[in-house]
Amino acid sequence: MLIFTCPYCGVAAEETELAAGGEAHLTRFGPGSSDDDFESYLFTRENPKGVHFERWRHVYGCGKWFHAARCTVSNEVFGTYSAQTTEPTAEIRETISKKRPGWSWRDMNGEG
Amino acid sequence: MSDLKNFDGLVSIREIEGQGMLVVRGDFSAPAFREAVCALAGVDFPEQRQAVVRDGRGLLWMSPDELMVMLPRAEASRARADLAAKLADQHALVGDVSDARVHFQIEGRVVRETIAKLAPVDMHPDVFAPGTLRRTRFGQVATAVWLLDERTARVFCFRSVRDYMAKLLAVAADEKSEVAYFQK
């Protein structure tokens, strides 16, 4: 069972109180973008074994969207952070580096 | 409609009539916003996840930008218009949701256990103190709940699922279903 602490209301909410919102930190390519960019925005997703960043919504609680970092193998939760950011916070990345040295996700890694 | 009047179980379940409710969204850090809602409800501004209610009037902290104002139902319509006028120059929203929600009061020795059977919430006395408001789900429906004291809880949900909630509470409080978890 996943338990995320909502960064907006502070509730430790378990999975059934939340709605999954898919991969985090996507850049939207809309009208006027190239076909390749639009296709990858629509369809191309990470499918990592290990560290992953996702969007979740506290749907049965305060209703806010937030970001979460977890391990897809063990379901260990590294932390949650604000939705108003385009990349994981330094604090989250540091936490992950301690627990999963050498991790990487997209073009991010433990050193970067 | 399932009738709770003669319900006799681990706790008593009573539907609260005449509870008025206003939903208010706005900037919690704005002094004018805080003054306006506090003046209307007659209580202090609630801390995060707190319910400050006295005699059917009060404020519930619903989210970082949403409050529920509790007041007598007869006053709700006028209070909505007055508050909306007061907050007209702010980025705020006021709605009268008295008809959209229904309140139940559950009271008795095993009130924590009754809630714990239905919601994914840690109801241990060290964790969930009276005055704490929790928005969650009871069974399949969105619900908010707070404890008035160790024996009394107030539960509210959408009126459209009123029957489901009444039956759910009645099953959880069946007199033969005591687990006595929190009495250990």
Image (cartoon, grey):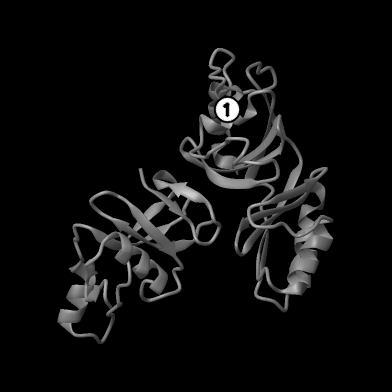
Q: Compare residues A63 and B44 and report the one nearer the observer.
A: B44
Q: Is residue A23 visible?
A: no
Q: Mark 1 points at which residue?
A: B113
Q: Residue furthest bottom?
A: A32
Compared to B145, does B27 lie above or below?
below
Q: Is residue A74 visible?
A: yes
Residue lying at 42% horizontally and 61% vertically, measured from the top left: A80
Would residue B30 appear left or right of A75 to someone viewing this image? right
Label 1: few (<14), some or many (≥20) within 10 Å?
A: many
Across and down, in percent, residue B62 comes to 62, 55
Q: Compare residues A91 and B178 and report the one nearer the observer.
A: A91
Across and down, in percent, residue B95 comes to 67, 59
Q: Compare residues A68 and B169 and report the one nearer the observer.
A: A68
- Name the image quarter holding the N terminus of chain B: top right
Chain letter of mark 1 equals: B
Q: Which amino acid does label 1 sit on?
A: Glu
